[in-house]
């Protein structure tokens, strides 16, 4: 697992590059996401360890997935193979949940795979609603169980269960059990079908 400073440096470069490519200023991204300009600036300088909730808001405002912030820029020369030892792992400083990017770094693909381990008693809340692009997600539980709230809907998911959803409402993940839950998340983005005007 990469150390926190190396991951913060990667996030800084990735976020700055995505914002620049989209033609957005710091103020513009702040207005679109509700994340303060100063916080975005700190992240882009590698001087902050942002939470998953903050990163998800920034990703939504940029029209990308949270997973793509940890990925490399697409490259035609990238290998299609992602060895376990080379997969980027990140721990949310707020909840302690751990996410591993399973997909090959930089290899162009419409699908992203992420492995998540949610510790006992952990809660992760994404209050992002509107997104610059439509994101479809499926969650497959490998071990343990979680409670997932999607807007007004609630689901209890156990090992083997798979839930399909669109990321267009606030989402909360909870692990009420006394052991970790492990699940795989598959994401696909359709930039042509955004969910409407940004906040």
Image (tube, rainbow, N blue to C red):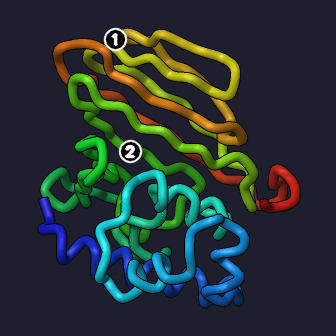
Question: Horizontally, is 104 left or right of 16 in the view?
Answer: left
- Comparing 31 with 198, the one in front is 31
Q: Position of residue 181 (x, y in %)?
A: 27, 23
Question: Residue at left 28%, top 74%?
Answer: 8
- How far, Cα to Cα, is label 1 from label 2? 17 Å
Question: Residue at left 37%, top 57%?
Answer: 51
Residue 109 appears in the rendering: yes
Question: Residue at left 60%, top 90%?
Answer: 20
Question: Horizontally, is 70 left or right of 23 in the view?
Answer: left
Please tell me the numbered disc located at residue 159.
1
Q: Secondary structure at mark 2?
A: strand
Q: Position of residue 113 (x, y in %)?
A: 43, 45
Residue 75 appears in the rendering: no
- Comparing 123 with 195, the one in front is 123
Q: Farthest residue in the right direction?
A: 196
Q: Position of residue 164 (x, y in %)?
A: 61, 25
Question: Horizontally, is 7 left or right of 123 in the view?
Answer: left
- Comparing 49 with 187, the one in front is 49
Q: Secondary structure at mark 1?
A: loop
Q: Quadrant of the N terminus?
A: bottom left
Q: Quadrant of the C terminus?
A: bottom right
Q: Which residue is mark 2?
A: 114
Of the image marks 1 and 2, the number of the one nearer the N terminus:
2
Depicted 126 relative to depicted 172: above or below: below
């Amino acid at each position: 697992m990469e150390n926190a400073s190396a991951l913060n440096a990667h996030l800084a470069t990735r976020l700055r590059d995505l914002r620049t490519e989209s033609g957005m200023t710091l103020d513009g991204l702040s207005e679109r996401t509700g994340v303060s300009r100063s916080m975005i600036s700190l992240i882009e300088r590698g001087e902050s360890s942002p939470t998953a909730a903050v990163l998800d808001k920034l990703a939504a405002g940029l029209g990308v997935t949270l997973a793509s912030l940890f990925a490399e820029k697409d490259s035609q020369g990238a290998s299609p193979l992602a060895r376990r030892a080379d997969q980027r792992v990140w721990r949310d400083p707020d909840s302690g949940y751990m996410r591993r990017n399973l997909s090959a770094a930089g290899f162009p693909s419409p699908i992203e795979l992420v492995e998540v381990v949610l510790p006992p008693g952990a809660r992760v809340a994404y209050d992002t609603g509107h997104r610059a692009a439509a994101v479809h997600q499926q969650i497959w539980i490998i071990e343990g169980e979680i409670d997932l709230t999607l807007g007004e809907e609630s689901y209890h998911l156990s090992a083997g269960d798979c839930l399909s959803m669109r990321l267009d409402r606030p989402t909360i993940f909870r692990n009420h059990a006394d052991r970790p839950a492990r699940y795989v998340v598959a994401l696909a983005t359709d930039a042509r079908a955004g969910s409407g005007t940004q906040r």
